[in-house]
């Protein structure tokens, strides 16, 4: 007998999942391998940046006061008494009307408080001595990147839980973090179910399709900074499926299955949860695609039962698995970023459930427009390629017209507080 399932709202489903997700383990790794990982400690400046006054240009270091009376009619001459490149330091004593030729990035000699660019001086050579003429007054601190002007020691620069982006990598290196404390990558098992499934390298055969979900999901897992584990595919056979799921749970931190969660004759996941003694958080969501998405827990271990339909599976990961992975990795902003946009296309079909449409986002003037990115079917794979957002269409008896303002969820990398389309 098929027991009626109670559909809950997407937000409710996310709430049930997220009510009890701990932060995962941490480990110290080489900076070399830290790109894309999640910081498990605050990144605090352990020095000023710059650490010393640096020249911003190739030029001459001088004392600005010495240029007070300089004019085009009456330029002032300085004798060049030193020459330093980046990394070098001038150790001599400087007197009035003396200059040191200095290259970008080099430390400004003491007693100097301005740089005049090479292009702005006239070079003069006189009996083996080197002079320059300056024909304008130079302000104090001109072309100097002052010590601590970008970052002062002790500043909190990147919070624990942030993704290590290329910019963060640069900061870590700046402060000498050759090793970094990061969240341990959760091991996420991916198990595809369905007697129709072939391995990728198998030729097509009547009634069969290739297991595309596992590869799509493993890529999604990887992009989140977790570790995907391919656990193969299962025939729709209860006994063997049960044994494999039970065994798989021991190898991973959380397990994603695709397919077999519906009410079909060969959908065995509900019975498997039952035999495992799993707590089923929900088994029906008022959303399309993916209404049969099921999430269960055995002790504290998550089992995500995603629908076999590729679009449903993809969206199920984005909405329900991603925030768990990010939380395990210590990230405090685990949800997809939401913005508003205008429908550039109608969606006239009434729907009792919230629809999630794979879309492109386009900027016109100062407005954002969304339009579907291919077939709006749960079985569609092509609509996932290049999809930039999921437009959220709440239940409606009449559908949605062109011009309606709708919410969309950005399908992009985290770390963006603002939508990149608006800049
Ligand atoms: P199910 O959720 O098992 O009822 O499957 C729903 C649809 O998704 C069926 O048409 C399946 O053939 C298809 N499907 C199931 N698993 C996969 C998979 N791993 N890759 C691609 N399509 C799949
Ligand atoms: Mg199936």
Image: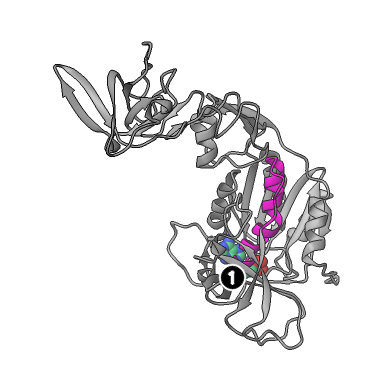
User: x%, y% of residue 321?
Assistant: 69, 53
Vertical order, 212 against 364 (above or below): above
For image coordinates 21% across by 30% down, the residue present is 123
300 or 88: which is nearer to us?
A: 88
Residue 74 point in image, percent of width and height: 28, 34
Category of crowding for the residue at label 1, using alpha-carbon neighbours closer than 10 angstroms: few (below 14), some (14–19), many (at least 20): many
The residue positioned 27% from the left and 38% from the top of the image is 73
**Relative vertical location of residue 269 with respect to residue 333 in this rendering, above or below:** below
The quarter of the image holding the C terminus is bottom right
Q: Position of residue 248 (x, y in %)?
A: 67, 44
24 is higher (above) or lower (below) than 232 = above
Colour setup of the view: one colour
Ligand 1 falls in quadrant: bottom right
Magenta span of residues:
308-336
Q: Quadrant of the N terminus?
A: bottom right
* Ligand 1 within 8 Å, label 1 CB: no
Position of 326 with respect to 94 (left or right) is right
């Amino acid at each position: 007998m098929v027991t009626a399932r109670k559909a809950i709202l997407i937000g409710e489903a996310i709430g049930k999942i997220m009510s009890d997700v701990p932060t995962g383990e941490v480990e110290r790794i080489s900076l070399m391998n830290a790109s894309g990982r999640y910081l498990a400690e605050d990144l605090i400046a352990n020095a000023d940046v710059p650490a010393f006054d640096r020249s911003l240009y190739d030029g001459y270091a001088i004392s600005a006061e010495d240029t007070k009376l300089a004019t085009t009619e009456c330029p002032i001459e300085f004798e060049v008494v030193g020459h330093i490149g980046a990394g070098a330091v001038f150790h001599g004593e400087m007197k009035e009307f003396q200059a040191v030729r200095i290259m970008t990035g080099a430390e400004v000699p003491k007693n100097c408080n301005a740089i005049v660019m090479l292009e702005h001086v006239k070079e003069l050579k006189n009996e083996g001595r080197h002079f320059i003429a300056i024909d304008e007054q130079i302000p104090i601190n001109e072309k100097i990147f002052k010590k601590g002007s970008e970052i002062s020691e002790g500043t909190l620069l990147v919070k624990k839980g942030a993704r290590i982006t290329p910019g963060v990598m640069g900061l870590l290196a700046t402060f000498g973090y050759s090793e970094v404390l990061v969240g341990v990558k959760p091991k996420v098992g991916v198990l595809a179910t369905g007697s129709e499934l072939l391995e990728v390298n198998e030729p097509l055969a009547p009634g069969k399709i290739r297991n595309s979900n596992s590869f799509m999901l493993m890529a999604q897992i990887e992009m989140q900074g977790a570790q995907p584990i391919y656990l193969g595919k299962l025939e729709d056979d209860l006994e063997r499926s049960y044994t494999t799921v039970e065994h798989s749970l021991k190898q991973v931190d959380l397990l994603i299955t695709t397919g077999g969660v519906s009410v079909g004759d060969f959908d065995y996941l509900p019975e498997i949860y039952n035999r495992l003694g799993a707590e089923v958080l929900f088994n029906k969501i008022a959303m399309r695609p993916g209404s049969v998405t099921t999430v269960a827990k055995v002790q504290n271990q998550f089992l995500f039962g995603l629908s076999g339909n590729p679009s449903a599976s993809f969206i199920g990961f984005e909405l329900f698995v991603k925030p768990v992975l990010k939380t395990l990795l210590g990230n405090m902003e685990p949800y997809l970023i939401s913005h508003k946009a205008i429908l550039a296309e109608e969606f006239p079909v009434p729907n009792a459930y919230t629809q999630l449409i794979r879309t492109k986002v386009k900027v016109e003037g100062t407005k954002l427009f969304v339009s579907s990115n291919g077939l709006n079917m749960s079985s569609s794979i092509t609509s996932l390629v290049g999809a930039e957002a999921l437009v959220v269409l709440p239940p409606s008896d009449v559908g949605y017209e062109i011009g309606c303002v709708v919410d969309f969820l950005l399908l992009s990398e985290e770390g963006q507080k603002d939508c990149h389309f608006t800049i």
